[in-house]
Image: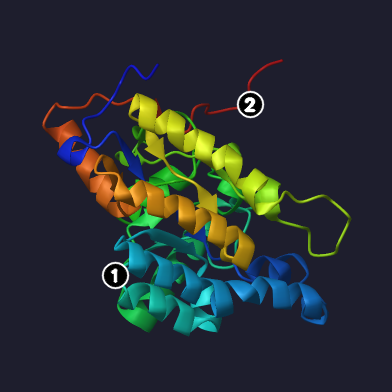
């Protein structure tokens, strides 16, 4: 079913990275700048991510002896530096996720550039760290994002949904590796409630995770990339993480599953392309230069 397969390292049948977007309460204060501080219960649930879930997740990864990738708004670096430090000191990768989880579609070119520059400076000033990966908040990659990522020296993006395999996106000033996911691989529809309770049903840990298991089995069968997008305050909850980490134990025990950071996967894919061992889909970005006619 996958025509442009890649030979993963050491005979692995698929590549895997459980990525986390550690948004915490950044988006609450962004969307409610005047009174977000009043949402005490909502803040407590969102702070569960950096305070409780991140240490739990890091302990699991340590036990499994794997390194994974976390995308973090730079506002969270300023407000939850201990959680970010814990991620880095355990050898995991951090990618940029805006400054305060901004919707980049609302930004001008200069506005988007300022957000990236501010975020990069914060990572460097706090930890001397230069992220090489990017995921647009809400997956809202704009007509300017690709060009800015090349300008700022990023190695890869993980915002788009155009293939089952890593591929290339080519803005006018260069190219960048795209490590795609899709909304069906996001824990939001399964586990996340709005800030104010609306009665929207959430799935049980087992039934909610079933979609991710089926996505893995397909990637394993056909040689794809398994790239869930989780949030610590949602999937890091006790019962949910118990289900997820148990499944990960099964996968790590296999000798033909490659767990790696997205940076490691991007580096490997780039090398395979440069040595003519992989011919990925190549998509010009932006796809359209003007409004299409109806």
Q: Is residue 111 left or right of residue 4?
A: right
Expressed as whole percent of the image width and height from the top left, the position of residue 264 reads 25, 51
Expressed as whole percent of the image width and height from the top left, the position of residue 144 reads 48, 44
Work out how far the residue at label 2 is from the one at label 1, CA to CA, in angstroms: 44 Å
Q: Disc 1 on helix, strand or loop?
A: loop
Residue 262's place in the image compared with 80, above or below, is above
Expressed as whole percent of the image width and height from the top left, the position of residue 120 reads 40, 68
What residue did someone put label 2 on?
291
Q: Disc 2 on helix, strand or loop?
A: loop
Viewer can see residue 141: yes
Residue 76, by quadrant, is bottom right
**Residue drawn where x is 74% and y is 64% of the image:** 31
Image quarter of the C terminus: top right
Expressed as whole percent of the image width and height from the top left, the position of residue 270 reads 21, 40
Viewer can see residue 154: no
**Residue drawn where x is 35% and y is 68% of the image:** 63
The numbered mark, 2 or 1, whose residue comes first in the sequence reads: 1
What residue did someone put label 1 on?
91
Residue 228's place in the image compared with 128, above or below, is above
């Amino acid at each position: 079913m996958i025509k442009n397969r890649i030979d993963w390292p050491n005979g692995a049948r698929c590549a895997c990275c459980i990525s986390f977007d550690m948004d915490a309460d950044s988006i609450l204060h962004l969307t409610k700048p005047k009174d977000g501080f009043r949402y005490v219960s909502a803040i407590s649930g969102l702070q569960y991510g950096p305070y409780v879930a991140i240490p739990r997740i890091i302990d699991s990864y340590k036990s499994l002896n794997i390194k994974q990738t976390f995308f973090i708004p730079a506002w969270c670096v300023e407000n939850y530096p201990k959680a970010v430090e814990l991620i880095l000191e355990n050898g995991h990768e951090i990618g940029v996720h805006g400054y305060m989880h901004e919707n980049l579609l609302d930004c001008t070119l200069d506005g988007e550039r300022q957000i990236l520059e501010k975020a990069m400076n914060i990572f460097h000033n706090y930890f001397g760290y230069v992220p090489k990966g990017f995921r647009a908040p809400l997956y809202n990659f704009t007509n300017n994002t690709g060009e800015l990522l090349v300008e700022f020296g990023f190695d890869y993006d993980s915002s788009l949904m155009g293939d089952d395999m890593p591929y290339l996106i080519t803005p006018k000033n260069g190219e960048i590796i795209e490590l795609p996911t899709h909304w069906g691989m996001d824990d939001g529809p399964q586990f996340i409630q709005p800030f104010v309770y609306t009665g929207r049903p959430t799935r049980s840990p087992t039934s909610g995770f079933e979609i991710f298991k089926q996505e893995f089995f397909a990637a394993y069968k056909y040689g794809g990339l398994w790239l869930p997008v989780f949030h610590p305050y949602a999937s890091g909850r006790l019962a949910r993480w118990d289900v997820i980490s148990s499944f990960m134990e099964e996968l790590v025990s296999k000798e033909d599953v490659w767990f790696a950071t997205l940076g490691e996967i991007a580096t490997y894919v780039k090398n395979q392309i440069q040595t003519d061992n992989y011919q990925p889909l190549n998509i010009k970005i932006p796809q359209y230069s003007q409004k299409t006619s109806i």
